Amino acid sequence: MKTYKIASIPGDGIGKEVVPAAIRVLREVENIHGGLKFEVSEYPWGSEYYLEHQQMMPEDGLGTLKHFDAIFLGAVGNPDIVPDHISLWELLINIRRSFEQVINIRPARTFAGLSSKLANSEDFDFIVVRENSEGEYSEAGGTIHQGGDKVAIQNAIFSRKGTERAMKFAFELAEQRRNKVTSATKSNGIYHTMPFWDEVFKDVSDNFPEVQTEKEHIDALAASFVTRPERFDVIVASNLFGDILTDIGAAIMGSVGIAPAANINMNGKYPSMFEPVHGSAPDIEGKGMANPIGQIWTAKMMLDHFGETEIADQLLTAIESVIRKGIVTQDIGGKATTTEVTDEIIQQLAEVT
């Protein structure tokens, strides 16, 4: 019996609906594969926890989480309760940085039965590898003066170690896919960090002679995501560029509600964290409208991370089947509720295994 210990943090808004839905799917995985067990411990941390405790999670929260095999996160944020820079930095980003989750990966692809937001789009299947520990999201900087003289300074930090690590991950991933890596750069406009990024990309690419490479400025690359997404395989990007590109990737799939993500710890010291791309969507909380596919696809990525690739692929096949049948939520043109979509995925999973 393989047992995986999972820390579940539903968080805010629809996270409290889609995380339980995905856990139901994992329970079906247990039923199908008797050799797997998921020990799930739920933690009620988030904006409502902040209202009561003046912190997004307890002081020993990281100490609690570090003993798990993975963290399964729903959504963080409710600006009506807690300012975004507090909710994100005290929970999501705090976990990413403290647990050295230095790589973020987010796939995007077409699904039969799901209309892309693009007119006449060809099939596409790409994955963005995002440097997840530094770059434009560095904490370095500050403010001086007040009023009309106030100045804010934000320093972007790019280390060779962090940049090279993300690029090497991207190349190794491309070797398992279609042997192409695209670098997101802006060396024609950002004077120091992006020429450095290009330099490291060239050095890393020399070690992967079988992988086709290209570099593209972020503005043109964003446009290409909309006009020709089928030409991409693996894209490697800095923290900010990767964040923006992956929201475009989610949008062109049909909805941000179906997009998954993984924050990967590469040294084995701490757990990795799995979360959908979508936010907390407080405007639809409690209405049964939340799309559970993003969270369930995220569970598939967690299974892949555990090495349970066979059942992970079967889960994705079940998701594809449900989309093809049109049993989907309103955001992607359907009428089904969160529960109905989850029920159908569980049913399809039982049929494909």
Image (cartoon, rainbow, N blue to C red):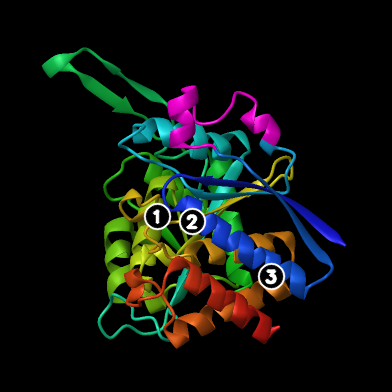
CA–CA distance in space, label 2 to label 3: 18 Å
Q: In the rendered image, which quarter is residue 98 located in?
A: top right
The residue located at (88%, 62%) in the rendering is 1
Task: Give the labeled residue for mark 1.
Answer: 286
Q: Is residue 125 left or right of residue 29?
A: left
As rendered, which of 328 and 2 lies closer to the eye? 328
In the image, residue 326 sits, relative to residue 128, either above or below, namely below
Q: Residues within 10 Å of mark 2 (few under 14, many from 20)?
A: many
Tell me the amino acid under the disc marked 3: Glu
The boundaries of the magenta stretch are 45-64
Q: Residues within 10 Å of mark 1 (few under 14, many from 20)?
A: few
As for residue 46 lying within the magenta part, the answer is: yes
Q: In what quadrant of the picture does the C terminus appear? A: bottom right
- Indicate which disc, 2 or 1, sits on the residue closer to the N terminus: 2
Task: Give the labeled residue for mark 2.
Answer: 17
In the image, residue 237 sits, relative to residue 149, either above or below, namely below
The residue located at (71%, 70%) in the rendering is 29
Mark identifier at residue 324: none
Q: In the rendered image, which quarter is residue 121 located in?
A: bottom left
As for residue 319 lying within the magenta part, the answer is: no
Secondary element type, mark 1: loop
Secondary element type, mark 3: helix
In the image, residue 319 sits, relative to residue 153, either above or below, namely below
Please identify, in this view, whether the residue under mark 1 or under mark 3 is nearer the observer. 1
Q: Residues within 10 Å of mark 3 (few under 14, many from 20)?
A: some
Task: Give the labeled residue for mark 3.
Answer: 28
As rendered, which of 158 and 239 lies closer to the eye? 239
- CB of mark 2 within 8 Å of CB of mark 1? yes
- Indicate which disc, 1 or 3, sits on the residue closer to the N terminus: 3
